[in-house]
Image (cartoon, rainbow, N blue to C red):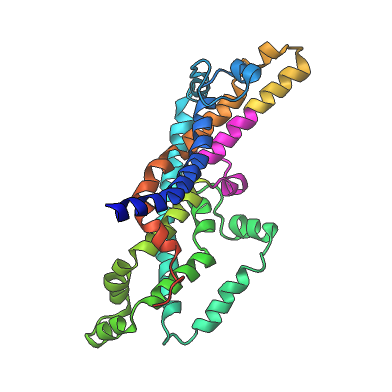
Amino acid sequence: MKRTADYSWSKLPIHLFFIAISVVFIVPLWSIISISLSKESDLVTVGYRLIPLNLDFQAYQYIFDNPLPILNAYKVTSIMSFAGTCLSVLMISMCAYALSRSDFKYRSIITFYLFFTTLFSGGLVPYYLLMTKVLHLQNSYAALIIPLLGSVWFVFLMRTFFQQLPDSLVESATLDGAGELRIYFTMIVPLSTPVMATVGLLQLLAYWNSWYQALLFIDKQELYPLQYLLQVMMSNIQEILRNMQENVPVDAGAAVQIPTESTRMAMCILAIGPMLFIFPFFQKYFAKGLTVGSVKG
C-alpha cells in the first residue's frame, strides 16, 4: 500500500501540470461562449466576464434573423469538407504509398520535386489565372476543393508511416498474385488507420476553416462557405456602425444597439461547434498518427 501511495504522489505534479494546461485551453472557449451570451451594453460597461452579467441571446437572434444563408453555408461547407477530405486522403495516401516503395524507380526524383514546391510558390496572379482563365472553375465546388487537395507535408508523413510496414507483406501479396491496387486497399489502408485518421482530421479542419478560396473564386452567395459568410456578415456590421458614426451623431448607448462584439463571438461558436463534436472520434488516432516516424523499429 505504501508503494502505491508513493507512486500516486509522484504523479501529482504531472497531473497538476496537465490540469493547468487543460484550463488554459478551456477558459478561452468558455470566455467566447460567455461573451456571445452577454448583452453588448454589459461588455461596454464591465468588459469581458466568464459568467454573463445578464444572459442575452441578441447576437444569435441577429445572426439567425435570416437563417437561410447560414443553413446554406453549412451545407456548402459540409459538402466541401467531406468531399475534399475523402479525396485528399485518397490522393495523398496513394502518392505516399508509391514513394514508400523501394522498388519505385522514380521515387527520388518525385520526392525532390514535391519538396521543391514547398520552397517556392507560383504566386497569386498565376494561381488566379490558372483557376479562372484556364480551368474555368470559378463559382463551383471544385474551386473550393481542388486548391486544398494536396499537402507535401502530409505526403511525407504518410510515406514515413508506410516505410515502417514490413516489406514482406507486399512481397507475399505479390507472390499470391495481388495487384498494386488490391494490396493498397486490402492491406495498406487497414494497417494505416492512425496516420490516415490524423491526416483526415487536419484536412477536415483546413476545409472547414477555409475562406480564402471563396474570396478569390466565388461570387454567388449560394456558394459561400460558412467561414466566408460569417466574415461578410461581420464586415457588414462594421460598415453599418461606420455609417452611423459618420452620418448620424450617436452616443455610446445607441452605438451598442447592434451586437458587435457578442455577434463576433457567436460567429466563432457557430464556426467551431461541429468540429468540437467531431474531434473526440479522432482523438485516439491523433497522437499516434502525429508521432509516426519518431521511433524506428
Residue at image position (42%, 48%) is 12
Residue 198 vertical position relative to residue 138 in the rendered view, above or below: below
Extent of the magenta region? 210-236
Task: Please identify the dominant SS of the magenta region.
Answer: helix
Locate residue 126: give its quadrant. bottom right
Residue 217 counted in the magenta span: yes
Residue 139 vertical position relative to residue 258 in the rendered view, above or below: below
Q: Where is residue 102 in the image (x, y as percent from the top left)?
A: 43, 85
User: Does 270 sit left or right of 124 as displayed?
Assistant: left
User: Does 122 sit left or right of 26 as displayed?
Assistant: right
Locate residue 166: give its quadrant. bottom left
Q: Position of residue 180 (x, y in %)?
A: 32, 79
Q: Where is residue 143 in the image (x, y as percent from the top left)?
A: 53, 52
Residue at image position (55%, 30%) is 265
Residue 20 counted in the magenta span: no
Task: Return the residue nearer the eye: 91 or 272.
Answer: 272
- Name the residue furthest front: 2
User: Does 74 sit left or right of 281 as displayed?
Assistant: right
Camera sees residue 87:
no
Task: Return the residue nearer the eye: 70 or 143.
Answer: 70
Q: Where is residue 186 in the image (x, y as percent from the top left)?
A: 26, 71
Q: In which quarter of the image is the C terminus?
A: bottom left
- Name the residue furthest left: 176
Camera sees residue 170:
yes
